[in-house]
Amino acid sequence: MSHVLIIAEAGVNHNGSVETAKRMIDKAVEAGADVIKFQTFKSEKLVSKSAKQAEYQKRNIANAENDSQLDMLKKLELTESDHNELMDYCAKKQIRFFSTAFDMESIDYLHSLHVGLWKIPSGEITNYPYLKKIAQFGEPVILSTGMCEMEDVEAALKVLTDNGLNKDKISILHCNTEYPTPFKDVNLLAMNELKDRFGVRVGYSDHTKGIEVPIAAVALGAEIIEKHFTLDRNMEGPDHKASLEPDELKAMVSAIRNIELALGDGHKTVSESERKNIVVARKSIVAAKNIKAGEVFNENNLTVKRPGNGISPMDWENVIGKTAKKDFVEDQLIEL
């Protein structure tokens, strides 16, 4: 299997602090993630003054003074200088910087930074001008599909390809947009439906608690895994409760790398590590009792025992009825 791209989703779990974001970069590097992803937005361009927080956001911000999305997001913005500082820090730490744009102005800004890879979040999959603008750059796109029917995904792909984006540059992530996602709503097998229906690279953006579902996604063929993480789930903020802590992120990455190795090339054959055990674990045809030369081999004087360095029991019918050319003692390998 090819290398699974693991995106450590920092999102807004830095709580607007560059220093916290840098610590998150450090932890993503320690965990072995390929990419760390942030979110780029201007709050006033993203939500209206009347927009209310989602239920999960209100649950996770116990001390929120009001339920305004605008007030919440304003505290979580990264400035342009913040972006530059974090990009430089990622380069220094040798991990790829990545961010999701949530408004048209932020698309232009990220394009000016030459990030070269686009993540379309589930909430923007029906945003025609947003999709069109990103498609026209001709750069690789990762499309999340939370809250989608198949026709929503098909329509978004059509906008992207109609506006010049080659289909082979598009990856689709199966996703459920609930934080945390109940296991019964994950529907992980839908990832394969997306692959079969649209013929593109697929992956999984996970919002469940724990690490088992993204690991299972890799076993099912996911080539990209995206997972939120935080320095501490007890921090104040909308996404911390549904995020992994650093030791869990590291465990997830390690497990995924093991699954990559375990999947192999799909061709059933004897591996080098097990070849030496064939003679030990398999059996041979041996004498069940002492046999004199001239006796005929039969069901009563032959049996099957380890080791497997003699005549294979698969040749049983070829041995039965033959005449012993010499004496055999009990347990001796039969020779013809």
Image (tube, grey):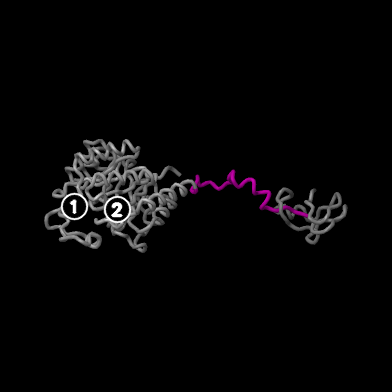
In the rendered image, the vertical position of residue 207 relative to residue 267, given as above or below? below
Picture quarter containing residue 242? Answer: bottom left
x%, y% of residue 208? 34, 58
Per the rendered image, the range of residues in magenta is 262-286
Q: Nearer the viewer, residue 133 or 238?
A: 238
Marks 2 and 1, the one that precedes in the sequence: 1
Residue positioned 15% across, 54% down in the render: 71
Residue positioned 16% across, 47% down in the render: 42
x%, y% of residue 317? 74, 55
Residue 155 shows up from this direction: no
Dot 2 amino acid type? Thr
x%, y% of residue 86? 26, 40
Distance from label 2 to label 1 (Cα)? 22 Å
x%, y% of residue 168? 34, 41
Q: Between tags 2 and 1, which lies in front?
A: 1
Q: Nearer the viewer, residue 139 or 36?
A: 36
Residue positioned 23% across, 53% down in the render: 123
Picture quarter containing residue 146? Answer: bottom left
**Where's the N terminus, which quadrant?**
top left
In the rendered image, the vertical position of residue 332 relative to residue 58, given as above or below? above
Local secondary structure at mark 2: loop
Dot 1 amino acid type? Leu
Residue corresponding to mark 2: 145
Number of other residues with Cα within 10 Å of mark 2, as a class: few under 14, some 14 to 19, many 20 or more: many
Residue 308 shows up from this direction: yes
Is 270 situated left or right of 156 in this image? right
Residue corresponding to mark 1: 73
Local secondary structure at mark 1: helix
Q: Is residue 88 magenta?
A: no
